Amino acid sequence: MKFVIALLIVLAPVAAHGQLLKCVGTDGKVEYASQCPPDTREIQTGIRNVPSASPPAATQKSLAEREADFRKRQTEGTEARQKNDAKAAEKSEQREACERARTNLKGLQEGQRIVQVDPKTGERVFLEDANRPAEIARAQKAADSNCK
């Protein structure tokens, strides 16, 4: 009796290795089975029920190597996010500088009263009409350089 049980245990995995077939009936009905019924056409699918063998030990990475790879990818991702954030902040600053330069230029061109601080005395001084064209030219240069 023990011999029969041992024989069944040894032969059971061999019976489990099968192949999936596509069976097409005369009416065009398609079935998938390990054996096609009579009056059907058998088509090979190439799908086998064979347990996949584990990859060779040489290609498997150890847990420490996989952990190191994971940490490397994580660090690279963090660095990429920081780089993208820095680019976004720089673009935002550039847009704000452009907007300030355009607003200043527009105010000068419309003739608004502009107040400046005198560097010698620290007092507020209004821009005189004689100095306005030079200040407009300076503001135009600032707008051109900031709004590329």
Image (spheres, helix red, strand yellow):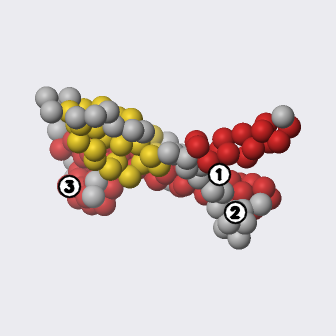
Is the residue marked by circle 3 packed among few (<14), some (14-19), or many (20+) residues within 10 Å?
few
| Of pointers 2 and 3, the one earlier in the residue sequence | 2
Q: Residue at x 41, y 42 (%)?
A: 20
Q: Label 1 to label 3, Cα distance in Å?
A: 56 Å
Where's residue 140, x and y in %? 24, 56
Give the image quarter of residue 24. Answer: top left
Residue 96 lies, in percent from the top left, at 38, 43
Going by the image, does 42 lie left or right of 119?
Answer: left
Q: Who's the residue at 82% across and 42% down the image? A: 3
142, 136: nearer the viewer: 142
**Mark 2 → mark 1, Cα distance in angstroms:** 21 Å
Q: Amino acid at mark 3?
A: Pro
Amino acid type of the residue tagged 1 in the rendering: Gln
Q: Which mark is residue 61?
A: none
Residue placed farthest to the right in the image? 2
Residue pointed to by mark 3:
133
**x and y, in percent, of residue 52 in the image:** 59, 52
Q: Which residue is mark 2?
A: 60
